[in-house]
């Protein structure tokens, strides 16, 4: 496994190419710094491999990168939801967001769903511009029960209307659901 960690480190942190006008001493300094970083990376790969169920540095690195990717994707969704649903007096233009995010206009339009709006509302402590979600510290979140995910699916079970003692019959009739605010 140490061979895999060593070779993987060379792939991730390759030796830099020397520029034609670069001084030999400067290049050796940069090369030494990259090799120190690579040695540290080998240690890190070996330690995450030891903690991974697969005990393999390559699989452990892929798992770590997949987790980072999921976190980045969620952050992009939340920012897009904020830009389109919470900015006042009006939302950012789809074209500008698409260019900035490296997405198509339709990709921006469908990138986030009701759950992402609820998260944003809970974090900033106010409703979206259309008042489909409203979160104030200590308040309940109220969104129409008819809201569906970006794929046209029903909302997850924990977001569906609940029979709660504090839910009025008018809310139930109107199709408004009540859930606890997200923290």
Image (cartoon, helix red, strand yellow):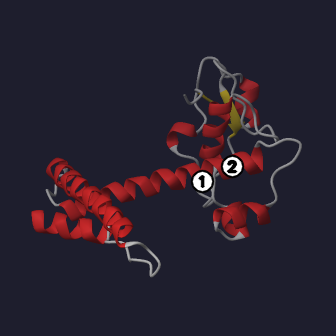
> Can you name the residue that lies furthest to the right here?
89
> Is 56 on the left-hand or right-hand side of 14?
left
Q: Can residue 1 be seen in this view?
A: no
Which of the two residues, 68 or 150, is positioned nearer the viewer here? Answer: 68
Q: Is residue 144 above or below residue 164?
A: below
Q: Where is residue 88 in the image (x, y as percent from the top left)?
A: 85, 41
Q: Do the residues labelled 1 and 2 touch (CB within 8 Å)?
A: no
Mark 1 — residue?
A: 76
| Residue 5 sits in quarter | bottom left
Q: Where is residue 26 in the image (x, y as percent from the top left)?
A: 38, 66
Q: Mark 1 to mark 2: distance in Å?
A: 9 Å
Which of the marked residues, 1 or 2, is nearer the chain's N terminus? 1
Identify the residue shown where x is 36% and y is 69%: 27
| Residue 62 sits in quarter | bottom left
Q: Position of residue 80 (x, y in %)?
A: 68, 52
Disc on res. 81: 2
Q: Mark 1, residues whose alpha carbon is within 10 Å: few (<14), some, or many (≥20)?
A: some
């Amino acid at each position: 496994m140490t061979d895999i960690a060593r070779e993987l480190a060379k792939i991730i942190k390759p030796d830099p190419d020397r520029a034609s006008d670069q001084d030999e001493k400067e290049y050796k300094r940069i090369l030494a710094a990259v090799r120190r970083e690579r040695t540290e990376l080998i240690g890190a790969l070996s330690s995450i491999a030891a903690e991974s169920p697969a005990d393999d540095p390559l699989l452990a690195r892929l798992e770590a990168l997949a987790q980072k990717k999921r976190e980045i994707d969620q952050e992009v969704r939340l920012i897009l939801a904020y830009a389109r649903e919470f900015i006042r007096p009006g939302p950012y233009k789809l074209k500008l967001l698409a260019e900035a995010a490296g997405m198509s206009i339709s990709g921006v339009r469908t990138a986030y769903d009701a759950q992402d709006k609820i998260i944003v509302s809970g974090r900033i402590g106010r409703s979206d511009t259309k008042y489909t979600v409203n979160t104030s510290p200590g308040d309940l979140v109220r969104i129409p029960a008819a809201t569906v995910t970006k794929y046209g699916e029903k909302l997850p079970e924990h977001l569906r209307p609940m029979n709660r003692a504090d839910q009025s019959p008018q809310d139930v009739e109107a199709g408004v659901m009540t859930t606890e605010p997200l923290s």
